[in-house]
């Protein structure tokens, strides 16, 4: 058999239907499917590794800004109300210690006391 030639008994259309040409597109489609579900949450552990449980944690965070806060944070809720798609970067934590261990800082709006302590210790 030569390069690009189908194995005996199979034509190239049969092979293409069984093996997608671009595996990256297929994986991206699966990730979109999982993340678009409203019942899947990114729960981050103290080591920063994400798992996908079906229940949110006690605190929410934003993966790109590395900020965590209450689930009813007025800033986060206003972003959602204005149409920002937070699902791609939204993560959850079981507790504050886990968020801090994962490298996140407290939100200045909904966790003011924790933010003041964090700010004082980081300067």
Image (cartoon, rainbow, N blue to C red):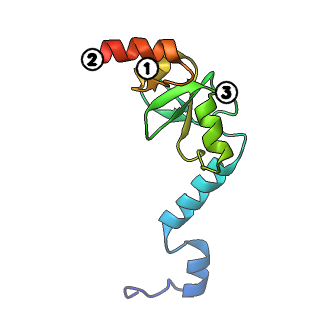
Q: Earlier in the sequence, mark 1 or mark 2?
A: 1
Q: Are marks 1 and 2 in contact (CB under 8 Å)?
A: no
Label drawn at residue 123: 2
Mark 2 Cα-neighbour bin, 10 Å: few <14, some 14–19, many ≥20: few
Query: Between 115 and 59, which is closer to the camera in this rendering?
Result: 115
Residue 72 in percent (x, y) is at 67, 27
Mark 3 Cα-neighbour bin, 10 Å: few <14, some 14–19, many ≥20: few
Question: Given this view, does label 1 or label 3 mark the residue nearer the observer?
Answer: 3
Compute the Cα span from label 1 to label 3: 19 Å
The answer to whether residue 54 shows anywhere in this view is yes
Q: Earlier in the sequence, mark 1 or mark 3?
A: 3
Which quarter of the picture shows residue 15?
bottom right
Looking at the image, residue 24 sits to the left or right of residue 31; the answer is left
Q: How many marks?
A: 3
Q: Earlier in the sequence, mark 2 or mark 3?
A: 3
Residue drawn at x 42%, y 25% as measured from the top left = 102
Residue 121 in percent (x, y) is at 32, 12
Query: Between 21 and 31, which is closer to the camera in this rendering?
Result: 31
Residue drawn at x 63%, y 25% as measured from the top left = 57
Label 2: element kind: loop
Q: Quadrant of the N terminus?
A: bottom left
Which quarter of the picture shows residue 95?
top right
Label 1: element kind: helix
Residue drawn at x 39%, y 26% as measured from the top left = 103
Residue 123 in percent (x, y) is at 27, 17
Residue drawn at x 64%, y 33% as measured from the top left = 53
| Vertical relation: 71 (above or below) 87 | above
Label 3: element kind: loop
Residue identifier under label 3: 72
As drawn, the residue found furthest toward the left would be 123
Compute the Cα span from label 2 to label 3: 28 Å
Residue identifier under label 1: 100
């Amino acid at each position: 058999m030569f390069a690009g030639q189908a194995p005996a008994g199979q034509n190239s259309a049969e092979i293409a239907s069984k093996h997608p040409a671009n595996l990256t597109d297929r994986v991206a489609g699966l990730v979109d499917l999982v993340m678009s579900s409203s019942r899947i949450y990114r729960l981050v552990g103290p080591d920063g590794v994400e798992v996908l449980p079906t229940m949110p944690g006690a605190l929410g965070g934003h993966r790109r800004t590395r900020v965590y806060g209450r689930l009813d944070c007025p800033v986060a809720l206003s972003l959602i109300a204005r149409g920002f798609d937070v699902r791609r970067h939204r993560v959850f934590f079981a507790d504050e210690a886990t968020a801090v261990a994962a490298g996140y800082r407290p939100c200045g709006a909904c966790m003011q006391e924790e933010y003041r302590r964090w700010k004082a210790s980081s300067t």
